[in-house]
Image (cartoon, grey):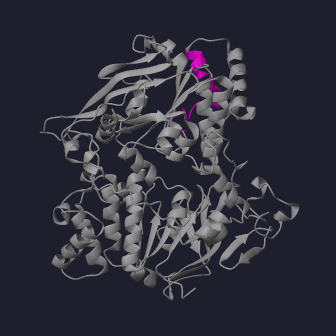
Amino acid sequence: MSYLLETRGLTRRFQVSQGMFRPKATLHALNGVDLRLRKGEVLGIVGESGCGKSTLAKILLNLLAPSEGTVLLDGKDIRALGRMEFTRRVQPVFQDPFSSLNPRKTIADIVTMPLRVHGIGTDAERRKRAAGIMDMVGLPARFAERYPKELSGGQRQRVAIARALVMNPDLIICDEPTSALDASVQSQILNLLMDLKRDLGLTYVFISHNLSVVEHLVDQVAVMYLGRVVELGMTAQVFDAPQHPYTRALLDSALTVAPGQGVPDIGLGTAFPNPLAIPPGCPFQPRCPRAFDLCAQVRPQPVDVAAGGAACLLTEEALRGAA
Amino acid sequence: MNKPLLSVRDLRVDLNTRSGVLHAVRGISFDVAPGETLCIVGESGCGKSMTSLALMDLLPRVARRSAGGITFDGQDLTRRRIAGRLRGRRMAMIFQEPMTALNPAFTIGDQMVEAYLYHVGGTRAQAVERAAQMLEKVGIGSARSRLSQYPHQLSGGLRQRVMIAMALITDPELLIADEPTTALDVTIQAQILRLLKDLQKELGLAIILITHDLGLVSRIAERVVVMYAGAIVEEGSAAEIFDRPAHPYTRALIDCIPQPGRTERGAHLGTIAGVVPSLIGPQEGCAFRDRCPVAQPRCASDIPTQQAGSHRWVCIHGGRA
């Protein structure tokens, strides 16, 4: 079985200034990330700030080179693909529809821009294609000559989606696409993304910190912590029976609508995950309510990308016990 | 309800804009009892933040506040001198982004001490003692050494704890929190909210929490006020609002969010058609009627307030329409 998208051992380091006279520190934003995604599937990436999910998005969009590892699109290294071919097949939808659209261009200009860059069609053909796409994402034709500032947040995000779709791409990388939107607008955009996926056979990587949204939308989910995938599996598996203590804490801390249930006690200490000083052993161990002595010394095996599961000594132990 | 701590009657906030007067808050009234948590919930532009700023007299220059009455513990908050005496001391406020609310050029100790000396007085040594005590109370270890740190040396969660410690240093009776956890990760959010609830119990604090997050509201509110287009459309206990929402807007808003266990994965979510009406100029009838699935012609005229116990809603329909 071939994969539309595959990452192998993605690692990304940054050199960060510690102040004028101090040596630079190395920040490990990503550390050996393996992921696979088939055509037509949605992969969700969840995790807290600093877990590397935005760095991952940039690498998947070929906006940033990994320090090590490769991203394969249909089995080919994206660094070897030409920029043109890559952008024809992979498109982004970013979080903030206010800064991701050029305020000086009309909506029609914004949506037809990728076609112009790729030299596709005549001006009239491009306009026609843009009109078709705008209709598909629920933007009235009269918006074509308007400017982004005249549109609401939800409408702008529709423009961003239209621009992503106009090249007829295979893969869309959505980085927090609804985080800046109100609940009633968010639901419209999520419905739209689901409809487009069904109608056009799209594949999404969906990065979000909103667990309810991820659970609702994705087929499989990767939970990231300090640059590593700590749990990977089908949505139902991960959300209904999380294996990693971090996944469990994350799910428990999500405040779903449940009047009278109060705020959960998730049992994580006040230790803050610092990507500049990742502890030896399991990176989650300083906060883990179930850590035992070995966790501070032994680094858990990375998640097997084929089988899924959790990168945790507890599950390794359980597996050994069963064998 | 026992005597309210804060009582707001017919509060209005108007902003002068180039296209006319924008009525951001259109005559809202509510009470907060001592020690209770009231959540004000609504989407962008509904007037929830303007309401909180109006209560603290922190409105931007272009905004004008008027009110039938705002009283705190029986004292008239619309009078400058009284408000100045109460604000920061008996009523405090925390904001969404602790990095912008703290001064980056001063240590957190300096800022906490200044707040204490300004509002309470006493000696510097007493103030330092009190600041360290408050940091411990909000769960920050080695408090003494933390006092000499600058805001940028702390993580977002710790900064919000510092904000809470600073707000509570004068032992206020009311805390107004505007989206206090929106900028934080979910795990940190849960910890901060638990901290607020624990402190509330310990100190007998009343909390007004402003948020757009319905899940959060359902977990911590005793009473909920739902705002739409500058007005209160529904008010009730958390159970009333979430189990028996009476206003069509409240119902629609709850249906918009995916609810694990209740919403089928991958199914279409509820939506609210149309957009919020312009807040410029007067509003006749129900502001939600153009988007409402059960609107009637008479929604364009005056809308009655219906009541069932403590549950109030502004709609022509009684309960489940």
Query: Residue B51: horizontal and vertical position, in percent?
Result: 55, 68
Residue depicted at x 57% and y 38%? A217
- Residue A3 vs B94, above or below: the answer is above
Which of the 4 quarters of the picture holds residue B44?
Answer: bottom right
Q: Is residue A112 magenta?
A: yes
Query: Residue B183: horizontal and vertical position, in percent?
Result: 42, 52
Residue depicted at x 68% and y 15%? A123
Query: Residue B37: horizontal and vertical position, in percent?
Result: 50, 73
All told, the count of numbered labels is: 0
Q: For residue B23, say whether it is visible.
A: no
Looking at the rendering, in which quadrant would you find the C terminus of chain A? top left
Query: Residue B201: horizontal and vertical position, in percent?
Result: 40, 76
Q: For residue A258, say whether it is visible.
A: yes
Question: Could you say which is closer to the camera, residue B282 or residue B7?
Answer: B7
- Residue A122 vs B50, above or below: the answer is above
In the displayed structure image, the side of residue A114 where residue A271 appears, left or right:
left
In the displayed structure image, the side of residue A302 where residue B208 appears, left or right:
right
Query: Seen from this angle, which residue lies furthest left?
Result: A21
Residue depicted at x 40% and y 68%? B196
Question: Could you say which is closer to the camera, residue A216 or residue B153?
Answer: A216
User: Where are the magenta residues, as a range?
Assistant: A97-117
- Residue B141 vs A223, above or below: the answer is below
In the displayed structure image, the side of residue B215 where residue B173 appears, left or right:
left
Question: Could you say which is closer to the camera, residue A217 or residue B56?
Answer: A217
Q: Is residue A296 magenta?
A: no
